[in-house]
Amino acid sequence: AEIHKWKAADEDHPHSLLDAAEPLIAAVGHFQSGRPESAEEWLSRASSAIVGSPFLELDWGIECLRAHLALRNRDAGEARRHVHRSLHIRDILLQMVPPRCRESFLAHPRFAPLTRIAARLERSPACSSSVSCSPVSGGSTASLWSKASFEGMVGRSAGMLRVFQTIEMLKDQDLPLLIVGETGTGKELVARAIFRRGHRRKGPFLAVHCASIPEELFEAELFGCTAGSFTGADEDRPGILETLDGGTALLDDVQSLSLACQAKLLQAIDSGAIRRLGGTTPLRIDVRFIFATSQDLAKAVADGSFRKDLYYRMRGLEISLPPLRERKEDIPLLARHFLEKHAARLERPAPALDDGALEALKAHDWPGNVRELEMILLRALVNLSPGGALLPAHFESLLQTAYRASRTASVPSRNLLARDLGDWKSDLEREY
């Protein structure tokens, strides 16, 4: 009765807490009364109500109850997955709590069911070693954060925690999503995380790198073609979007699409249907579109190389990834992650990283971001004798080479063809 009274007073709020709390309370009641099917139905309502809302506090409870339901159905793997999500959401909340209050936050009785189910799964012989389910004790972070890893992404900085939280909030929305970030920041990792954690995870996923497909073939690749539509098209062939029905498409480097392809892509997003190249019959598609770019699309819109209507359609939901130079506190975590990853591949123990070497890594600007850091560490590891430690000397030449390459990349030679030599020299002197 109280819920309905307050709900009536809260009807105009765009994200009502009660819209999500009421079905969650009902789901708990049905579960405790031995009606798992009804609990699942109410949980689906709660999950739908929480999409796009700021009430992350309820999300971990939804995942925890889903884990209990999975255990009731004797599906330990599904239960671990939901416990993994619940622990992660709780740890996002933990980062928002002042350090002096974290111990009491974790000891709150509302986390008791999560702690019990995590301990139960931890004791299970079938518990996967890749997903630790042990609860947090004291003021330390949960086992999920022992490597500060979230779906292959590493970081504890405020910027990355915001990215992880945004992924949780947007994972089940079927609206187009734009991921913006410099090269090497992990845009494809974010797209895959959204796919794996969202309700489309049982469908297909494909990352399409738009710049790698010739412009004259892109339309046929994306939308398919009919026999005789162009030279070499001997039979009807489905396109990428047809094969991704019920799944997710990542279109990376979307700024490289021609204006004609942009127009057809916009029509596909708006109508939920496509036409093969040379065909007349519309084909319905059920695909979530995720776009990624390292360029300033607003500038591309202003100079006419990118359609304004597609740009505004794409950025209904947006995730912006911070460059590595703005989250250097994550470099020790990333360095340890990459050293362990590649040392295991090379079948050798991960080397220690000297404090001086770590400071040298932190001092670098990393124009290539996380991808550049990984390659630098891999090269240093390959050149290191097994059992040795990585010292500043191991990185000195590598970082200098990377610096020279980044400076060279800032003045592409193709621009010389359209420049006056005097102006070009003035620009170089100003930059120097």
Image (cartoon, rainbow, N blue to C red):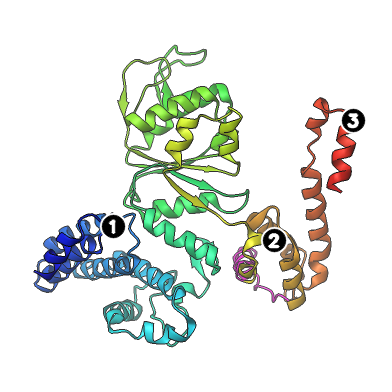
**Labels 2 and 3: the sequence-earlier one:** 2
Q: Amino acid at mark 3?
A: Leu
| Residue 256 visible to the viewer | no
Distance from Cα at disc 3 to Cα at disc 1: 59 Å
Marks 1 and 2: which is nearer the front?
A: 1
| Residue 265 visible to the viewer | yes
Marks 3 and 1: which is nearer the front?
A: 1
Distance from Cα at disc 2 to Cα at disc 3: 40 Å
The residue carrying mark 3 is 421
Image point (72%, 72%), residue name: 358
**Labels 1 and 2: the sequence-earlier one:** 1
Task: Identify the secondary structure beneath mark 2.
Answer: helix
Q: Classify residue 335 by image quadrant.
A: bottom right
Q: Is 295 within the magenta?
A: no
Q: Amino acid at mark 2?
A: Leu
Image point (77%, 43%), residue name: 410
Task: Identify the secondary structure beneath mark 1.
Answer: loop
Task: Identify the secondary structure beneath mark 3.
Answer: helix
**Quadrant of the image for the N terminus?**
bottom left
Image point (68%, 52%), residue name: 368
**Mark identifier at residue 416:** none
Q: What span is in magenta?
A: 333-354
Residue 363 at what x, y percent from top left? Answer: 75, 66
Residue contact between numbered discs 3 and 1, judged by CB atoms under 8 Å: no
Position of 227 relative to 177 (above/below): above
Q: Amino acid at mark 1?
A: His
The residue carrying mark 2 is 378
The residue carrying mark 1 is 15
Relative to 95, is 157 on the left or the right? right
